[in-house]
Each structure stands twice: as C-alpha cells, then as structure tokens.
Amino acid sequence: MNVTINDVAKHAGVSMKTVSRVINREPSVKQATYDKVMASVTALNYQPNQAARNLASTKSYIIGFVYSNPNAYYVIDMQNGMLSECRKRGYELLIHPCQPSSGEFIEEITSLVKHSRIAGLVLTPPYSEMPSVVKALQQLDIKFVRIISGSKPSKSTQGCVLVDDKTAAFEITQHLIDLGHEKIGFLCGGKEHKSTEARLSGYEQALAENRIRQSKQLVLDGDYSFDSGVEGAKKLLSRKNRPTAIFAANDEIAAGALFAARLSGVAIPEELSIVGFEDSPFSRQTWPKLTTAHQPNNTIAETAASMLIDMLQNTNDKQVQSQCIRFCPELVVRDSSARLLN
C-alpha cells in the first residue's frame, strides 16, 4: 500500500499540517520538528505526489526555466542543475524554450506566467539581460532570478547570479600573452548576449595592460556556433598578417576554428594557438583538447533555482530577495595553446 501523509503524521506524532509544512520546507518550522518528521518520511519511504500537491494547494510548487540558446550542452547543464535543486526542495520544473527572433517573446513569456501554474521563473541570457522582459515580469508581480554576465553586484543585479565573463576572458588572453602571442584574433558570439561584450572587453583590457596595440581586423562578429567559428577562422587565416593565436568566445566557436585551421593545413598549437570559453564537451572532443575557461553551468543553474525557491519561501525577508551571487570561470590549460616559436 502507498504511504500517505496521514501515516507520516501518525508515525512522527504530529499533525498532517505540520508534515505538510515540513515537506514544503516552510521557514517557520523548528529544526527539531523538521528532523522528527523527516526521520518518519525516511522510515516509511514516503514519496509526496507533487502533481496532486499542486492541484490541491493554492500555492504553486512549479518553477519555470525560460531560455534561448543554440548550445545544447549549455541548455542540458542548466536543466540538470535546476532539476537537481527542485527535486531536493520538493518543486517541479517547467522548461520553456523561446525565440527572441520571433518578435513576440515578451507576449509568449507573459502568457506562460498567466496561463501556467508557476510560482516563479529562472531566466538565462538573452532574456535575463533584456530590460523589457524584466519590466514585463515586474508588472506581473512574479518572482524571478536572472543569470547574467557581470562582475560586480549592484542594485540592478539583485536577485541575480552573475557570471564574471570579463575577468575570465582577461585571464585567458593573459595566458596567450604570457606564451609570447601578441597577434591574437577574437571571434565574437551573438551580440544579443552580454557575455559577448564582456568577453571582448576582457580581451581588450589584457591587450591594453600589456601595451599591445589592438587590431580591429583581428576581431570578427559572429554567433555562438561551430559554423561561425569555421567562417571566422577562415577569414583570419586568409589575412596577410594573420594571427598567431585565436580566442573564440565559446568552445563551439573554438572547435569550428580548429576545424578550419586543419583544413588550411595549419598545425595546432605549433603554428596557431586556439582557446575557447565555458569548458563544454566541445573543448574535450577536439584534438588537441582546447584550453578554455571552466564555467560551472550545472552549479550556476542549481544556485539560481535555490535562490528562487528561497525567495518563494521567504517572501518577507529583504536579504533573501536581494541576493546576488558571483561565479568567475577559471582558466583550464590544455594542448591547444603553446608558446610562440620565433
């Protein structure tokens, strides 16, 4: 027979309402009561029916994940991170892809909030970085957490998880400079993502601090895709004064650049160093493996989901509502970058 919430209440010697408060992780529950109830949950192997709970309660236990990103590895890491936290906290996750190119994305997100029984949203770029989306959600009076590119907390980044792309990009560029490279190409991602601007800014800062003159011809626009890396690298390698190193704004672009270099007969890293960003599986599936910056997307997503659930459960706690947590991707040196041979 299935164990019910009433069985747990009897086993723990508390009311059904108390069991419900424990399972819902309400902050007012005393630690001793929480421990006693959870001991009974474990002893009886009680499995709450999340769907039934959502139908029976006036309170929603569903959070939404809204995204638009061509990188499947990024999306999967985000989903897994949020799902992990939801399962620990007794919430369900609604996953909703959306296309900003449609021109109706604000209406789509608004409709999702109004017609789906969700308690809050986690937003990833580019939506998390669009003032129009933030304004629309504020008008709907729904809790949300944004994952955005940034280095310093501010009033506008409250309720955010920051990814310090600029500092990480500076360190990657400095790594190439320390290897003797001065002619360093940069392949950009999509302009709608602030990470592109931040990573380019870190690259430019490293050049400036090392008194290396930046060449605009070595910086090419593109998007976060393999094909963009192929096309960008072809253009850079066709230049008379071609670069000795290429910094790609993510690993997918870098993998494309490496592919193009091989097609051109350029040896990696003997003739050309190539580095990426994010430490996605792309960085480990190439040969040689890519030097990159490890961006813990799974942990970032788990943190964002945890922040949102904390907000939902502590609605009157101003400190909880204004949290801002920063992650800085860390340099991972592999075989695709090497010292420049004179």
Image: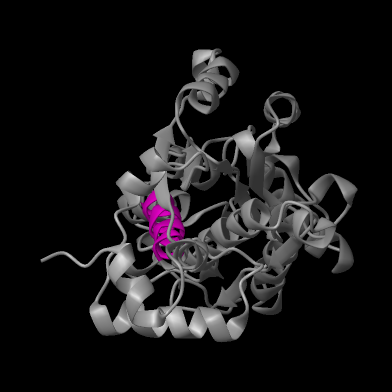
Q: Residue at x 50, y 71 (%)?
A: 291
Residues in magenta?
73-87
Q: Nearer the viewer, residue 127 or 35?
A: 35
- Front residue of 102/37: it is 37
Residue 235: percent from left, percent from top:
51, 39
Question: How far across and how far down the image is residue 104, in percent?
Answer: 54, 13
Image quadrant in which the N terminus is located: bottom left
Residue 220 location (% of width, % of height): 61, 39
Q: Residue at x 79, y 64 (%)?
A: 206
Q: Is residue 122 above or below residue 175?
A: above
Residue 320 placement, left or right of 142? right
Q: In the figure, 221 relative to 14: above or below? A: above
* Closest to the observer, 283 or 214: 283
Query: Which of the 4 image quadrants contains residue 171?
Result: bottom right
Q: Which residue is at the front of the view, 258 or 264?
A: 258
For the C terminus, the image quarter is bottom right
* Magenta region, main secondary structure: helix
> In the rendered image, which quarter is residue 204 located in?
bottom right
Q: Which color scheme does this rendered protein use?
A: one colour
> Please, is residue 38 above or below residue 217 in the view?
below
